[in-house]
Image (cartoon, rainbow, N blue to C red):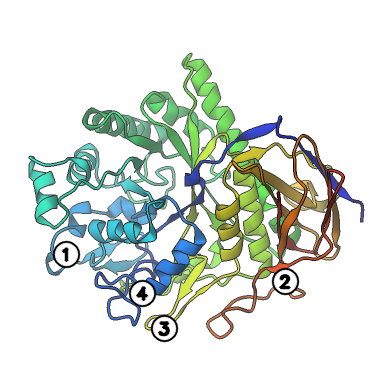
């Protein structure tokens, strides 16, 4: 196979990686919360009912911002149901997922969970703009953030949280363009309520960071027009606009599935173009950044039947996809796409964190384990901090049904503060080893620290309750660095992390 090539030069960069790029998402959906992060009575549960085995894996994963409580769930959510004594909290029907919500896990428990992850874990709170509006958003903001001396801030103290929570990052609703969303709105309707909510929230705190709802996907009929209309109302009031994207193979088209990041990069670039067009039209120097606050591999085609069959259970097993090596390679490629656009994608949330299309799985009363997708995320979070270098690949290509000709190599590189560089690379070929050559210009790198790969002779290999460590990254031998040139062989269908210093 022809050698894939690119050059790294510190003079050519994309931008600095915002730590929020390694965020995740906890929604009251399926077993993400109950028997996921929260299971009183579990052998590892702490005094607050949080599973310590899960906390350890979340820390290892390297999660930063955690979006909460939804998702579709938030459009029917009454935040006040989730505070105060647990025994007084009401049970509610969750229309989004045809489940019964007990509210045993609420705002205080969510913040306790973040604190136990560590100081890097930042809250990202969504407000309900589906069935509620400006007043309820302000009440939640006052309860969470005002120091004291008002009815709601004093109520928070009465509930046991004397100090303000200090939520800085807020989502103004969720997927309001989607007909599936409770309280679905037109772009004009949503733009107005988002603008009024944002304006009022900034009256309480001018420094809050706000995310407006963008399109739920690039395939939506209203895509781009939705963003343009919403931003025309909110441009000076918000900081980010959201993007959501999920990928799965359709009709057995694995080649297109492997090139899913082609669509993700196109989505990002089209939203940036729309944002900048609106900014130019408004004669504004402000740049709207992107919050890719839902992304993953998700086998969605079976979800509707799963949900429709439910009869309001508590925490049912929903969306518990078991990921293969192939899924993990696509997942890694999506991470590469986010890093390649770090100049404008400043928030990203892997959906979701535990059990529900998640890198971490649990069994009630039993163990927790890592899915195949756990490893690309944990490695990217650990080694993908710093400045993204501009990578322009010269790669052999292959044909896909959805995206036409696609590169076999998908890659990026991040330079850390200490000058070390990490190359992240995916070989999309299912059959051939891909030779890689990287020219290093202006980089004083003399040593390969590690070449790690996630690959397997069986692309369908998975980690399960029975075999929780069937798939793990392995060390690749033979990678070399001589005279400013890195050479490597990327195994078929592989996610690669090459660390240089």
The CA span between labels 4 and 2 is 30 Å
Picture layout, residue 235 above or below residue 100:
above
Residue 24 locus on image (x, y percent): 46, 55
Of circles 1 and 2, the one toward us is 2
Residue 196 locus on image (x, y percent): 28, 30
The CA span between labels 1 and 2 is 46 Å
In the image, 476 versus 258, the foreground residue is 476
Residue highlighted by disc 4: 35
The CA span between labels 3 and 1 is 28 Å
Left or right position of 220 against 41:
right
Of circles 1 and 4, the one toward us is 4
Q: Which mark is residue 190?
A: none
Of circles 3 and 4, the one toward us is 3
Q: Residue at x 57, y 46 (%)?
A: 385
Dot placed on the residue nearer the N-terminal end, 2 or 3: 3
Residue highlighted by disc 3: 366
Question: Of helix, strand and loop, which one carries label 1?
Answer: loop
Residue highlighted by disc 2: 459
Dot placed on the residue nearer the N-terminal end, 3 or 4: 4
| Residue 462 visible in this rendered orientation of the protein | yes
Question: Of helix, strand and loop, which one carries label 3?
Answer: loop
The CA span between labels 1 and 4 is 20 Å
């Amino acid at each position: 196979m022809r050698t894939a090539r690119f050059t790294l030069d510190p003079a050519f960069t994309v931008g600095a990686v915002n730590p929020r790029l390694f965020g995740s998402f906890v929604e009251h959906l399926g077993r993400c919360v109950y028997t996921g992060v929260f299971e009183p009575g579990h052998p590892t549960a702490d005094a607050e009912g949080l599973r310590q085995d899960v906390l350890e894996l979340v820390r290892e994963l390297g999660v930063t911002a955690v979006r909460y409580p939804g998702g579709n769930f938030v459009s029917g959510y009454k935040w006040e149901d989730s505070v105060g004594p647990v025994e007084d909290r009401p049970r509610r029907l969750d229309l989004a997922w045809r489940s019964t919500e007990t509210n045993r896990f609420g705002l205080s428990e969510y913040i306790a969970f973040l604190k136990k992850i560590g100081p890097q874990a930042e809250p990202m709170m969504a407000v309900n703009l589906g069935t509620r509006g400006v007043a309820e958003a302000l009440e939640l903001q006052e309860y969470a953030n005002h120091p004291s001396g008002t009815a709601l801030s004093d109520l928070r103290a009465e509930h046991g949280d004397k100090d303000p929570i200090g939520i800085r990052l807020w989502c103004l609703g969720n997927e309001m363009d989607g007909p599936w969303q409770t309280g679905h709105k037109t772009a004009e309707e949503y733009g107005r309520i988002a603008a009024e909510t944002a304006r009022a929230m900034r009256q309480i705190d001018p420094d809050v960071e706000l995310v407006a709802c963008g399109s739920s996907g690039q395939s939506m009929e209203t895509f781009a027009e939705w963003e343009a209309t919403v931003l025309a109302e909110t441009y000076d009031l918000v900081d980010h606009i959201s993007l959501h994207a999920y990928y799965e193979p359709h009709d057995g088209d694995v080649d297109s599935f492997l090139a899913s990041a082609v669509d993700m990069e196109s989505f990002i670039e089209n939203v940036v173009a729309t944002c900048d067009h609106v900014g130019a039209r408004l004669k504004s120097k402000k740049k709207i950044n992107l919050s890719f606050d839902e992304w993953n591999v998700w086998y969605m085609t079976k979800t509707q039947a799963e949900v429709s069959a439910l009869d309001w259970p508590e925490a049912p097993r929903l969306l518990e996809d078991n990921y293969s090596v192939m899924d993990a390679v696509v997942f890694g490629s999506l991470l590469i796409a986010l890093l390649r656009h770090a100049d404008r994608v400043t928030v990203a949330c892997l959906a979701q964190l535990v059990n529900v299309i998640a890198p971490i799985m649990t069994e009630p009363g039993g163990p927790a384990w890592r899915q195949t997708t756990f490893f690309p995320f944990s490695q990217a979070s650990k080694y993908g901090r710093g400045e993204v270098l501009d990578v322009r690949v010269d790669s052999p290509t292959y044909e896909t049904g959805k995206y036409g000709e696609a590169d076999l190599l998908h890659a990026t590189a991040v330079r850390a503060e200490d000058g070390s560089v990490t190359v992240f690379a995916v070989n999309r070929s299912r059959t051939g080893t891909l030779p890689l050559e990287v020219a290093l210009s202006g980089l004083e790198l003399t040593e390969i620290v590690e070449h790690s790969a996630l690959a397997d002779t069986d692309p369908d290999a998975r980690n399960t309750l029975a075999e929780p460590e069937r798939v793990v990254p392995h060390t690749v031998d033979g990678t070399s660095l001589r005279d400013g040139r890195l050479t490597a062989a990327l195994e078929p269908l592989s996610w690669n992390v090459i660390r240089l210093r």
